Image (spheres, rainbow, N blue to C red):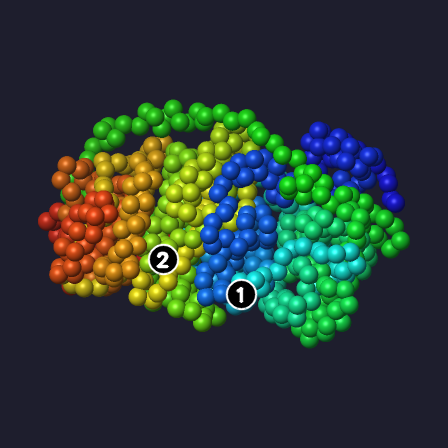
Amino acid sequence: MVHQPATLEQAKQLGLLEEEFHKICDILGRHPNFTEISIYSVMWSEHCSYKNSIVWLKTLPKSGSKMLAEAGEENAGLVDIGDGLACCFKIESHNHPSAIEPYQGAATGVGGINRDIFSMGARPIAQLNSLRFGNINTPRTQWLVKGVVKGIGDYGNAFGIPTVGGEVYFDDCYEQNNLVNAMSVGIVGVGQSISAGAGPAGNPVYIFGSATGKDGIHGAAFASKDMSEDSISDLPSVQVGDPFWEKLILEASMEIIATGAVVGMQDMGAAGITCSTSEMSAKTDVGMDVWLDKVPMRQPDMKGWELLLSESQERMLVIIEKGREKEVETILEKWDLTFAHIGMVTDTKHVRYFMGDVLEADIPAESLVLGGGAPIYRRTWTEPEYFKEIAQFNMNAIEDLSLSEAKAVAIQLCNEPNIASKRWIYEQYDSMVGTINESTNLPSDAAVVKIVGSEKSLALTVDCNSRYVFADPNKGTQIAVAEAARNIRCSGGVPTAITNCLNFGNPYNEEVYYQFKNAIEGMGEACRKFDTPVTGGNVSFYNQSTNGQAVYPTPTIGMVGIIDQPEYRMSIPFTGAGDAIVLLGSTRNDLGSSQYIAKIKGVSHSPCPTFDLEEEYALHMLLETLSKEQAVASAHDISEGGLFVACLESAMAGGRGFDICTEKGLRLDAGLFGESQSRVVVSVSQGSLDRLMKLAAVAGVTATHVGTVLADKVICVNGDHWGAMDSFTKPYQEVIASYMN
């Protein structure tokens, strides 16, 4: 065995702590060599081991009546959706790569999350994304937006999986560290999914897909450190994607899985061959011998550690039932894929990596993985200092608006990128290819995708208002879960389960760790209330600028719901002239953390909106009743921009105008632009209004008749004629494009 002992200094340079280096020596009973210390550095990185987060992640609810695979069991979540089918879904980050090379960083994020889905035997049917950027006025942000959007669009469009939903936010805190979170959703028959295990000793180990190059080496470690001015030097840590290869790999994977010869399969994402071989070994309590010189290489004379740590894209590791090698090889040849028999499952419980006749590394598989020997830390936390500034916020010090001022503010808000249409972005994505997307022509708060061969549809959404989480990590994260569930309810669905992408700053910063801990606690409370267990996801720490300023805590929620019958669908558009507009839920004199208070009034620190889980739950139960009884003509969640923006969006979608009045006793700005939670605006025919009010009363939900849908495209507020809708819709539709073009 090659054994030139690695030094403590080398370990530190690779991101390991001194205590971790000594632990590795204890595990091995000797000093590791350079290859071995490199393996531990990526497998014990935050990105792979979750060493600073797992203690809190374990507190999240993981079980439920529809769960087929609990968090951490497989590459992605798996829930029973009825009719003998299961939904496989997951969200992950590709933040750091996208910050230095936005096109490839975003593209490979899309490729990686899709491989997580089809490595389990599920065919991807839909993608979503959650994106965060800095100030849209800056050249850097515009460059990042263009690169990220093109990367997502080019990869997804070429791969043939539609992008059906997402969210985009702009804020100064993301200027140097943008966030790119990608979600994929697939369908597989119940009992037909593939595990990421290795099976008994003697099974052959194959790699197939692209050849292995030097791109992405130490990518997992790169994702586990702060961004800096020198991060551009980490460009080799950014992988390069090829969606056409991925399409071939998908079809070949589906075909070899159908043979029944596959024992286990896993894509090669973070930490490459190292991660796949060690995790698959540890999962089934076996070992592997891997012959690195047999790995197909894109570049000559690659070293063993380079082959082990490369994160070259479009590669799969598959364990085949012994004796059925030729059957699988024939299929891989049919799809013209590069493949090689690179190893064998053993009973040693060690992963051993050879280069020719030389043993490069010999490590107990269990010692490398989350839940095994990987370190677990419970960091200390401190309440953030900025909470003091939030506590000093006094709404009464802000003068209320007159009606004429409110009109001007409404136009200003339509020009705000966080509120305005993201059409310039989503028009670059194919939203229809290969999928029956029911929300393209009939928009709803969640994307609605028809399940082929079933009466059912999936309702899909991603949500997080990071400004709320910044103001109150616990309540803000509860709201993120609640809004995701509310969007699914407003679309006629029943929330089923979530995946999460947890984007935070440096966990060694005690204020950041406070944000993380409290966000997880809030998520757990909300998920238990809505019966939406957590199927898994991703933790992304170290998201901050070169001066150490962390991004807003951004625990993005990806949620899946089920619409049982087509007639249960609800949608956004106001369609019937003369229909009553009804506000469900209570509006408060609350301006906290609203786009109005932040962007119009320039207040950076204000409280999270008032939120109550019981109040939210009652609204959800009412929405379920309205859906099943087809009691309303439209339904739309009230979020950023408040009541006015919600009505405007419903009006635009239906080609109608609206006449609304704010409730008495409220400030005008709070009534129109405040972001009080647990509210939905619905429209209903005048003949059905009484029935709606009675249903709301029974459910214990406040219902207020606030206006009327107009035949003409005009807007009236509190009896004041605000003119044609065009003066509001034009900036709403065009502002993003004006910056990008």
In the image, 219: left or right of 83?
right
Q: Nearer the viewer, residue 612 or 668?
A: 612
Location of residue 453 by image quarter: bottom left
Of the two numbered discs 2 and 1 in the rendering, the one whose residue sits closer to the viewer = 1
Please report whichever mark, 2 or 1, sits nearer to the chain's N-terminal start. Answer: 1
Q: Which mark is residue 189?
A: 1
Q: Position of residue 489 (x, y in %)?
A: 33, 54
Residue at x 27% of width, y 55% of height: 625
Q: Which residue is mark 2?
A: 493
Residue 189, given in percent of the width and then of the height, sits at: 53, 65
* Residue 194, percent from left and from top: 62, 60
Residue at x-position 59% and y-position 50%? 73
Outermost residue toward the left in this view:
719
- Tell whether label 1 touches label 2 (CB within 8 Å): no
Q: Which percent across, then down, holds residue 271? A: 68, 48
Badge 1: few (under 14), some or many (20 or more) residues near its Cα, within 10 Å?
some
Judging from the image, what secondary structure is the residue with disc 2 in?
loop
Front-most of residues 20 and 72: 72
Q: Quadrant of the C terminus?
A: bottom left
Q: Quadrant of the N terminus?
A: top right
Judge left or right: residue 154 versus residue 686.
right
Q: Is residue 652 visible?
A: no
Amino acid type for the residue under numbered disc 2: Gly
Residue 74 or 396: which is nearer the viewer?
74
Q: Residue at x 17, y 51 (%)?
A: 694
Indicate whether 402 appears above or below 359: above
Q: Amino acid at mark 1?
A: Gly
